[in-house]
Image (cartoon, rainbow, N blue to C red):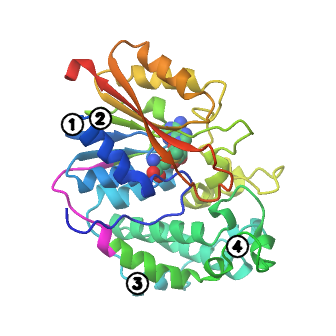
Amino acid sequence: MPDIILPKTRYYGSKRKIIDKIWNIIVNEANLEFDSVLDVFGGSASFSYYAKLNQKQVLYNDIFQFNTIIGRKLIEQNTNELTYENAVKLFERLPEVNYLNHIAEYYNDIYFTDEENNQIDIYIQNVLALENENVKCSALYILFQSCLMKRPYNLFHRRNLNMRLNYKKGNFGNKQTWERSFQELFIRFIKELDKVCIDNGRINTAYNFSALNCHLGADLVYIDPPYFKKESSTSYHSKYHFLEGLVNYYDIPNNINFNKKNKEININASREFEDKTNFLNDLRILISNHIDSHIVISYRNNGIPSIEEISELLRSFNLFNVVEYNLGKYNYALNKNNEFNEEILLICKNLNKI
Ligand SMILES: C[S@@+](CC[C@H](N)C(=O)[O-])C[C@H]1O[C@@H](n2cnc3c(N)ncnc32)[C@H](O)[C@@H]1O
């Protein structure tokens, strides 16, 4: 393959940094044969994108609409039609539009500065009114990636704008990145989109189902679910509700949880795969929906439920040859204590396909 460029992201749990290892195990060590993939928990689309680069037919899926837009941009669409000049014009007020100011009004002092909140309000309303789907997905893509970069921890789970503003040397974080303007970050993401939007000669699609409602099929199903440590974990919804809110801008006021300090937006919150007590049961149902496929699961050595419990569940189907691969220590962004944090790949070769 020519020089590979993978889209950069600060998305929590992205497999971007280890995707070459994952792919190598699937193709060269486990020798799985497949022409199509379903990426059920698609997130930043790193697995889907690598599969697209490798000429597979790709079906991307994620429960969140903002992620599905990322999937549509990187997987379904093959070009970027948004120029930098047109992207920054989207910050300008159009005289004929009566703009709302939901972000400035409700998210004052929470995630972004007043000036940035005003920018987001105008930009998102201009973007949602666009008719060209390609331009619209690009415009949303660069906004989401920039919002992630400007946030301490790259998340929206805490009201912590003050952490960014009061940053002193030695504190955790990267003040320089947080303070970059949207306009400056857009230069980088537009350039990146121009490079990473590719056509692999296949029809690839992005979907927005919850995993258990995703009744699509493919030769290989990749499962990279939310992951729980012993300590309580923050749900993906809580981490990214703000971006999901932006996609549903006009519904924000009716969905704000004012009891939470971070004013979480209750759109598309779900317990599915976000409740450790029910995780194995959810996984059993998910596997049952894909018993004709090879299954590949990304997991970690110290999660709840344990690798042993998951392997036992997979073996109980009597349909797969299950092999566990250890990819070694993997430093997830922001995880300071990763001494025993090892990335595991469970490859379930479907015996009916051998
Ligand atoms: C560990 S991340 C996947 C990361 C992805 N492989 C990547 O490289 O970016 C888990 C993903 O599952 C999604 N998710 C959470 N619950 C879900 C559900 N019930 N159905 C589908 N997707 C879900 C989250 O939005 C998140 O993007």
User: Closer to the camera: disc 3 or disc 2?
Assistant: 2
Whether 67 is among the magenta residues is no
Residue 61 in which image quadrant: top left
Label 4 or label 1, whichever lies nearer to me, is: 1
Dot 4 falls on a residue whose secondary structure is loop
Q: Residues within 10 Å of mark 3 (few under 14, many from 20)?
A: some
Q: Are marks 2 and 1 in contact (CB under 8 Å)?
A: yes
Q: Is 202 inside the magenta-drawn segment?
A: yes
**Residue 279 place in picture, x, y as percent:** 59, 27
The residue at label 2 has a CB less than 8 Å from ligand 1:
no
Mark 4 or 2 closer to N-term? 4
User: Is residue 172 visible in the rendered structure shown here?
Assistant: yes
- Tag shown at residue 112: 4
Q: Residue at x 41, y 87 (%)?
A: 85
Question: What is the x, y in percent for residue 242?
Answer: 64, 58
Number of the label disc, if any, that sits on residue 84: 3
Helix, strand or loop at label 1? It is loop
Write the start and end of the magenta stretch as one range: 194-205
**Mark 4: few, some, or many residues within 10 Å (few <14, many ≥20)?**
many
Specify which label sits upstream in the sequence, 3 or 4: 3
